[in-house]
Amino acid sequence: MSGEYRIFGAEMSPYSVKVRAYFRYKGIPHQWLSRRANEEEFQKYARLPIVPLVVTPDGTGIQDSTPIMEKLDAGFPEPSIHPEDPVLNFLSALIEEYGDEWGNKLMFHHRWFGEADQLATAHVLARGGMPDAPWDAVNEAAATVRERMVSRVHFTGSSPENAPLISAYLDRLLEILKPHLAERKYLFGARPAFADFGLGLQVYEMALDPTAGAIIRARTPEVLAWAYRMTEPRNDGPFESWESLQPTLEPLLRDAGDFFLPWSTANARALQEGEESFSVTLGGKDYVQGPQKYHARSLNALRERYAAVTDKSALDPILAAAGCLPYLT
């Protein structure tokens, strides 16, 4: 078989474009295929009905964006997305997890909460799956997509009660990223790290939508430029040191310590205790949602990664100052 990989994904899937950006950065030969336009082929290799799906040259199917990248990194180590400094390496992995789970919450809520966003996204998804269909058929399909996706928003905690809280979380994130990205191309310096792939493509997807996109464009053009840069990332230099990153990257770690990790820990506890919903105080306000199984697994994976750090003498003070340490041990 040829050495070309196949990526089955969707332009409106942050995890799909995350994997595509990784392939582009690594220079891995690949085809980008719409899942909806290649459903029969997708079903041959997929274990789960989710994108992205990567089919290797030997015909093996791999799913879930982070495991895909970790598996391929063994065969395509350069250019590396992992800083050599073990402290920065773990911090990058922490932010990658923050992006995948917390960033996705912000994206999904804003994409499917308001009517304008629902209509716009549903039509983009419908047209993407049937590019040559007449408008009547697209409109009918869009109505079905909208109904299905809006019925799922509770999985990410989106609700009228949580809406102002989630909007505030996005505002906070953008305020943090703005100064950090004002004079650097990527989160850890002049080249993308694991963290950029996890968070940057969630922000990119937000930038495509009416409400979140307008907010990002109006308030933080630096963040917008980074999000689009992450669709075609380049190695333009080295990773920076913690000393140069700390002044503006530490607030992002504190955001994880104040919001993401307490929420993720409460979610895991609720699953363990068999609760139908849980409440956690974030930033002095109560946030309520039903538990999600995948988040508990990914939190365990992050804790295992932390436990694998052999010398934590430089890492632990940083995590403690950001309020992250109690949730990782």
Image: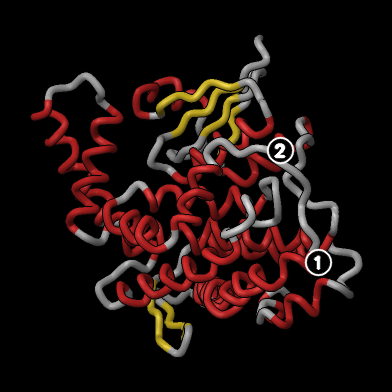
Task: Name above or below for residue 290 compared with residue 235.
Answer: below
Q: Quadrant of the N terminus?
A: top right
Which amino acid lies under the numbered mark 2 shown in the image of this protein?
A: Lys
Residue closer to the observer: 193 or 49: 193
Q: Is residue 253 found left or right of 228 in the rendered image? A: right
Residue at position x 67%, y 77% from top? 324
Residue kind at label 1, given as amino acid type? Ala
* Residue 61 percent across, percent down from the top left: 58, 29
Judged left or right of residue 329, residue 299 is left
Query: What is the crowding at mark 1: few (fewer than 14 residues within 10 Å), some, or many (at least 20)?
Result: few
Q: Is residue 55 left or right of residue 302?
A: left
Q: Residue 321 shows which numbered tag?
A: none
Q: Residue at x 77, y 57 (%)?
A: 240
Quadrant in the rendering for residue 301: bottom right
Residue 153 visible in the displayed image = yes
- Give residue 123's position: percent from left, percent from top: 21, 39
Quadrant of the image containing the C terminus? bottom right
Gap between marks 2 and 1, in whole Å? 20 Å
Decide if residue 297 is in sight here: no
Q: Position of residue 55 (x, y in %)?
A: 58, 25
> Is residue 176 positioned above or below 211 on the image?
below
Front residue of 227 and 149: 227
Q: How crowded is the residue under tag 2: few (<14 C-alpha within 10 Å), some, or many (20+)?
A: few
**Residue 71, numbered circle:** 2
Residue lying at the far bottom in this picture: please name it. Answer: 284
Question: Which residue occupies the extreme top position in the image?
Answer: 1
Q: Residue at x 50, y 32 (%)?
A: 46
Q: Secondary structure at mark 2?
A: helix
- Which numbered circle lies on residue 307? 1
